[in-house]
Amino acid sequence: MQEYSKLYKYVITMMKSEKSPTLILPQGRNSLLDGETQRGDEQKKTILCYLPLCYKLRNISKLSAVLLLSLMLTVSCTHEDNHHNNQNNFNDNRTKVINNVSFNTEKGDMLFKLADTLQGKFSFAGNTAPDSIILFVDGRKSGKINFSDGKFPFYTGTQKLGNHTLMFFSYFGKDKEVDTYRYTLLNNASPKIITWKVVKTFPHNVKSYTQGLFFKDGFLFEGTGQWGQSSLQKIDLAKNEVIKTYSLPHDIFGEGIVAYKNKIIELTWQSHEAFEYDAETFKLINRFTYDTEGWGITNYGDSLLMSDGTNLLYILDPASFTVIDKIQVFDDKGPVRNLNELENINGQIFANVYQTDDIVIIDPKTGAVTHKINLKGLLPDDERTPQTDVLNGIAWDNDRKIFLVTGKNWPHMYQLELSGITLE
């Protein structure tokens, strides 16, 4: 209740303020755990989400404010109760807070690299060992642990990179203790640096705020952004001719594009909506919704792969846009965030890193950044204007072996030759 009292005072203060509230991130966040808060922060997170509403309603009476805050607390507590109920259902009714089992690693933290063996050790209060311990990895049962010597070696080489959980179900007669530990898995090698040279330069419309780029049937397709300027274009690259254009509504900010069978799908930034067009006529035939922001999108086998500006890539069902799975993208240092435009080149995922000159190449099986291309200096400084924005846009023509890049409001598109990686 002390936490809620502080939150109450903060909400009331912000409601009386003439300034917009500043979002305060919950404390206790592990910097390597993207978008996750520690247990106990959920109520604070829920209430903080209501601050913009409180700001808009700051002229209401104090009594109304109390009622509003009470409603928020009720929603938050209900969420917390449901969370614990779900946890209890998962653990079943034998679970007790026994605190008899402790687990530590030899290196003292829970940060590992791919193919490391996590060398752990159990200790038991009062030397009372459980009858058995069952291991769950990311919620999936892995098997029974042999803990006769208290040691627990766990090989990480078969896992994807990113944040994971170990759960130990320790059984003491009819009782069960559940202990959860989080660990982070990094890549075990630094990205290899790819060198490049310009093969050919093509004109590019400086009014095109490039969000997506791909080749299909010999033509280049470009999706552009900005409010009131977003579009889908079909371009004859050799002739520098726009053959077909579809303009999005003025209140839509266009993002990445992808060809899927005889259709084209275009993301939007913050509208949580994707548009599906007939690839030949550009007729709008369907709409999909999604929960995150939309940034980049590409093909991934029979599925689609979408970025949202974090280090996550979402595997989507093309028929419904339902999330099938997620890929956490990490290198040997940590999460690689701001993933933007995407291009799948024969199973390797190329991604622009927003606000940088970098393109990273990702192994989708593990989420590892295997290679990096730094394109600093590609667009000469003397050709930059106040309207020139960042590098963005990757396209691969598999038939003509053209690797093409550009940027937002750039005057050129560049065909590059890459050394140190095979694209075919």
Image: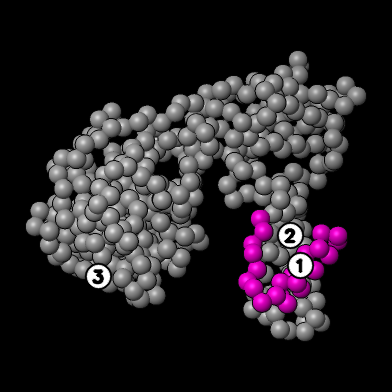
Q: Report how far apart the C-alphas of labels 2 and 3 lie in the structure.
A: 45 Å
Q: Residues within 10 Å of mark 3 (few under 14, many from 20)?
A: some
Which region is colored magenta? 1-25
Camera-side residue of 387 and 381: 381
Q: Residues within 10 Å of mark 2 (few under 14, many from 20)?
A: many
Of circles 1 and 3, which is in front?
Answer: 1
Vertical side of 122 occupied by 261: above or below: below
Of circles 1 and 2, which is in front?
Answer: 1
Q: Main secondary structure of the magenta part?
A: helix
Which SS class for mark 3? strand
Q: Circle 1 is placed at which residue position? A: 10
Q: Report how far apart the C-alphas of labels 1 and 2 lie in the structure.
A: 14 Å
Instruction: Of the two numbered discs 1 and 2 on the same chain, state the one appearing first in sequence.
Output: 1
Instruction: Of the two numbered discs 1 and 3 on the same chain, state the one appearing first in sequence.
Output: 1
The answer to whether residue 369 is left or right of residue 35 is left
Seen at 73% across and 59% down, the residue is: 44
Which SS class for mark 2? helix
In this rendering, does residue 314 appear at all? Answer: no
The answer to whether residue 128 is left or right of residue 317 is right
Seen at 67% across and 59% down, the residue is: 24
> Which amino acid lies under the numbered mark 3 shown in the image of this protein?
Tyr
> Which amino acid lies under the numbered mark 2 shown in the image of this protein?
Gln
Q: Circle 2 is placed at which residue position? A: 43
